[in-house]
Amino acid sequence: MDADVTIIGAGVVGLAIATELSRYYDQVFVIERHEHFGMETSSRNSEVIHSGIYYKPGTLKARLCREGRDMLYRYCREHDIGYRKCGKLIVATQKEETGQLEEILYTARRNDVADARMITVAEAAEMEPHIRVVQALFFPSSGIVDIHGLMQSLENESANREVDFAYGCEAKGIKQDSGNHAYIIHIQDTDGSFFDFTSRYVINSAGLEAEKVARMAGIDDPQYKTWFWKGEYFALLNGKHKLINRLVYPVPEPNTTGLGIHTTPDLGGRQKLGPNTIFLEDGKTDYSVDPAHAKEFYRKARRFLPFLEPGDLAPDQAGIRPKLQKPGDPARDFIIREEEKKGFPGLVNLIGIESPGLTAALGIGRYVRSLLQKYD
Ligand SMILES: Cc1cc2nc3c(=O)[nH]c(=O)nc-3n(C[C@H](O)[C@H](O)[C@H](O)COP(=O)(O)OP(=O)(O)OC[C@H]3O[C@@H](n4cnc5c(N)ncnc54)[C@H](O)[C@@H]3O)c2cc1C
């Protein structure tokens, strides 16, 4: 056997899994098709540490977000990774929205986000003097993190425990080698050559490609059908970034799949607005930002950022969420499944790891280990 465990994908989730599993297995491989870790969704997001308020109680999203959040803050402190527990406001800008704040607070309490609280207009104005608000919820445990620093630290920690990273290597096939209780993984590297190796366990943490990788192994489950949703960001210009200190979110619009265009500070002091939610019907990865969407951003954000002028926004980055729902479908949970029941013992699929995947990453690592524990 060449490896005990092979992890396909070196995004923040694959790296967190590698770090966790390297405590239990001698030979852990990470296969990544790019030349570096974190070249896809993990470098194209808001870098927010979510407190875990929106998710249906009892779901993996709710549980792993809460556990992952606490683990992440601890990890950042212990490994000297940049983060700021800046807190988050969800603001109602008209009386009709205040009922939604009550609903969010109720879900937050059911998800054990104990520090969430309703605040007065005066308190909100003290925290953020430049926003418009009629009522707000405050979440002290939300924050932001330097995700590149986090991924670098996870890679270093794994490498120190002898995890092997194969960059520029794309998994092209996975075959079961039942006699040996293993999998044969067929790889193509950047110069076009192919090679195979065997692994006792396989973890499919391939982000946007996870459904495809599952199919590659022979698992064609309609529940794993993944839809791509783009999220664009615009940077705040003309010194306006200095007028906001925290994460400020609107009340989510009904029937949308995002959290609403919100402010996202980064550790360098910049502010972005975003992301919006654009369904990519053709399933292609398109990271362009349409400058014409500045109008929509302006219109939506000006409701709670009254100082905003049309010229204050410049196209920034975009990221793509792998969601398990298409427009009109209800929200779906993460799928993180060890596939013994389907006849694939020791193969773990992670499908639909959209937000809060960054916040949950360390919790996901621990959860994946728990799924393999029965084989010890
Ligand atoms: C716009 C946006 C905003 C978000 N904001 C937040 C936020 O504020 N907070 C939060 O908690 N979460 C947020 N998220 C979610 C978070 O970014 C993701 O859940 C997380 O980055 C997923 O990490 P991953 O490792 O699963 O995927 P990825 O980072 O996509 O990594 C998967 C890796 O697998 C590799 N791969 C794929 N196929 C193969 C193959 N066949 N062989 C080898 N390698 C392969 C890819 O190259 C890639 O590097 C956001 C997402 C988006 C899109």
Image (cartoon, rainbow, N blue to C red):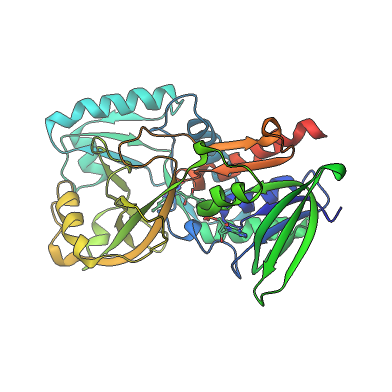
Residue situated furthest bottom in the rendering: 191
Left/right of residue 12 with respect to residue 174 in the rendered view:
left
Q: Write down the quadrant of residue 249 in the picture.
A: top left
x and y percent of residue 331 in the render? 39, 34
Residue displayed at 60% across by 40% down: 364
User: Is 208 located above or below residue 98 in the figure?
Assistant: below
Left/right of residue 270 with respect to residue 292 in the rendered view:
right
Q: Which residue occupies the foreground of this view, 242 or 66? A: 66
Can the viewer see residue 146 in this picture?
A: no
Count of numbered marks: 0
Q: Quadrant of the C terminus?
A: top right
Residue displayed at 28% across by 38% down: 90
Q: Which residue occupies the foreground of this view, 153 or 6? A: 6
Left/right of residue 270 with respect to residue 321 in the rendered view:
left
x and y percent of residue 36 in the render? 60, 68
User: Is 299 located above or below residue 372 in the figure?
Assistant: below
Residue displayed at 23% across by 67% down: 291
Can the viewer see residue 330 in this picture?
A: yes
x and y percent of residue 165 in the render? 71, 63
Q: Write down the quadrant of residue 161 in the picture.
A: bottom right
Q: Which residue occupies the foreground of this view, 309 or 216? A: 216
Q: Write down the quadrant of residue 94 in the picture.
A: top left
x and y percent of residue 254 in the render? 24, 35
